Image (cartoon, rainbow, N blue to C red):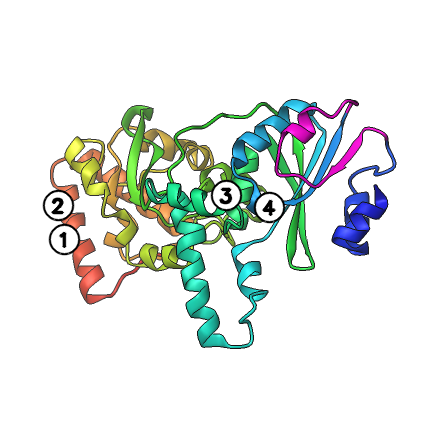
């Protein structure tokens, strides 16, 4: 077993695995497979599994993770290996020719990253590749693992491949409704505590919603009130967010009656629990809105400034329920156009 790991991954990776798993134990299984049959039909008792085959080559990734989950008990370890999008680009055969490298990688990104996620086109991808060499981001693999009942313990890169150490903590979610497309909805807290589905353009990798607690646990909040060092964001997602373009689909929520044009931002249940109790109570009295108070009041986008702006808006809304939104709307438009107010 030790020789297999060293030959495939190197000495550093072997020492890394050894810091979490007793590789000498009989109940530690090391395999290199893309077929869950080889794991499910292993005859002995297993309490840790290390798969040296890349996740990129597994056709039904979640089904594979779900079968591994079935084989293990809670607190047992599962180690996966995969090549990230960045890792793939760095090791490319045209790595020393920047222009050709970027053009070639662009074609690969479309075929190996986008085709598998678009209805109709994914049939072409699987027909040609049999599900191999898929381009995967770190965030997507992490999110898939968490959705399948695993907790992220640690990860590191050896010889261009990322190895992720996880621990089974529960049964899989068996989520069949994960959104891959550019348009999706998020669960948010609405008026009266009702859960609403807010529409946005995608700015994060698929399965990113499963990593909210992990990101906050590891990095905490940034001064903007959003998760710090959030690797779930895509490069184009940062641009969309800066100019609020990702929130244009929220106009659908306005037409549905879930949101109004001006109001406190619709937030997740996780973030809702972190704000002061008095502000929670004020928030639940009104519908959330698309244009937040800190924009209308031209405040900074750090947590304290945003919360203070929300408190001022809500207190004013209680006193003047019919005129507050109109005044805040025109203030916000003025600040966006003439003071170039932008999102964090």
Which marked residue is nearer to the observer: mark 1 or mark 4? 4
Residue in the picture at 81% in, 51% down: 6
Decide which of tag 3 and tag 1 comes sooner along the chain: 3
Q: Which of 82 and 132 is in front in this view?
A: 132
Which marked residue is nearer to the observer: mark 2 or mark 3? 3
Task: Left or right? Give the position of 67 relative to 297.
Answer: right
Q: Mark 4 points at which residue?
A: 218
Task: Give percent across and percent down for residue 111.
Answer: 41, 53
Which label belongs to residue 131? 3
Q: Nearer the viewer, residue 6 or 74?
A: 6
Task: Left or right? Give the position of 165 relative to 143.
Answer: right
Q: Which of 257 and 134 is in front in this view?
A: 134
Which marked residue is nearer to the observer: mark 3 or mark 4? 3
Characterize the magenta stretch by its predominant secondary structure. loop
Decide which of tag 2 and tag 3 comes sooner along the chain: 3
Which element is circle 1 on?
Answer: helix
Task: Give percent across and percent down for residue 228.
Answer: 51, 52
User: Is the C-beta separation of discs 2 and 1 under 8 Å?
Assistant: yes
Q: Name the residue under label 1.
A: 330
Task: Left or right? Give the position of 61 relative to 181.
Answer: right
- The CA distance from mark 2 to mark 1 is 7 Å
């Amino acid at each position: 077993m030790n020789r297999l790991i060293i030959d495939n991954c190197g000495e550093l990776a072997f020492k890394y695995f050894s810091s979490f798993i007793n590789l000498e134990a009989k109940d530690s299984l090391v395999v290199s497979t893309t077929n869950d049959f080889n794991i499910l039909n292993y005859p002995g008792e297993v309490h840790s599994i290390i798969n040296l085959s890349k996740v990129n080559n597994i056709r039904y990734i979640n089904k594979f993770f779900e079968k591994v989950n079935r084989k293990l008990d809670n607190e047992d370890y599962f180690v996966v290996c995969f090549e990230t999008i960045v890792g793939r680009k760095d090791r490319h055969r045209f790595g020393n020719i920047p222009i050709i490298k970027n053009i070639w990688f662009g074609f690969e990104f479309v075929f190996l990253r986008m085709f598998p996620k678009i209805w109709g086109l994914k049939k072409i991808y699987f027909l040609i590749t049999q599900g191999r060499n898929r381009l995967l981001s770190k965030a997507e693999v992490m999110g898939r693992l968490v959705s399948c009942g695993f907790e992220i313990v640690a990860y590191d890169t050896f010889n261009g491949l990322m190895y992720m150490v996880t621990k089974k903590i529960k049964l899989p979610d068996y989520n069949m409704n994960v959104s891959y497309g550019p348009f999706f909805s998020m669960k948010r807290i609405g008026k009266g505590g009702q859960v609403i589905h807010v529409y946005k353009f995608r700015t994060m990798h698929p399965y990113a919603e499963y990593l909210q607690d992990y990101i906050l646990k590891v990095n905490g909040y940034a001064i903007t009130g959003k998760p710090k060092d959030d690797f779930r964001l895509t490069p184009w997602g940062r641009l969309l967010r800066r100019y609020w373009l990702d929130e244009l689909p929220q106009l659908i929520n306005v037409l549905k009656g879930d949101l109004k044009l001006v109001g406190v931002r619709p937030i997740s249940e996780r973030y809702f629990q972190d704000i002061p109790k008095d502000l929670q109570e004020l928030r639940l009295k009104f519908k959330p809105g698309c244009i937040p108070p800190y924009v209308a009041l031209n405040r900074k986008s750090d947590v304290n400034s945003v919360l203070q702006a929300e408190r001022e808006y809500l207190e004013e809304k209680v006193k003047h329920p019919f005129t507050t939104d109109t005044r805040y709307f025109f203030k916000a438009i003025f600040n966006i156009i003439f003071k170039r107010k932008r999102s964090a």
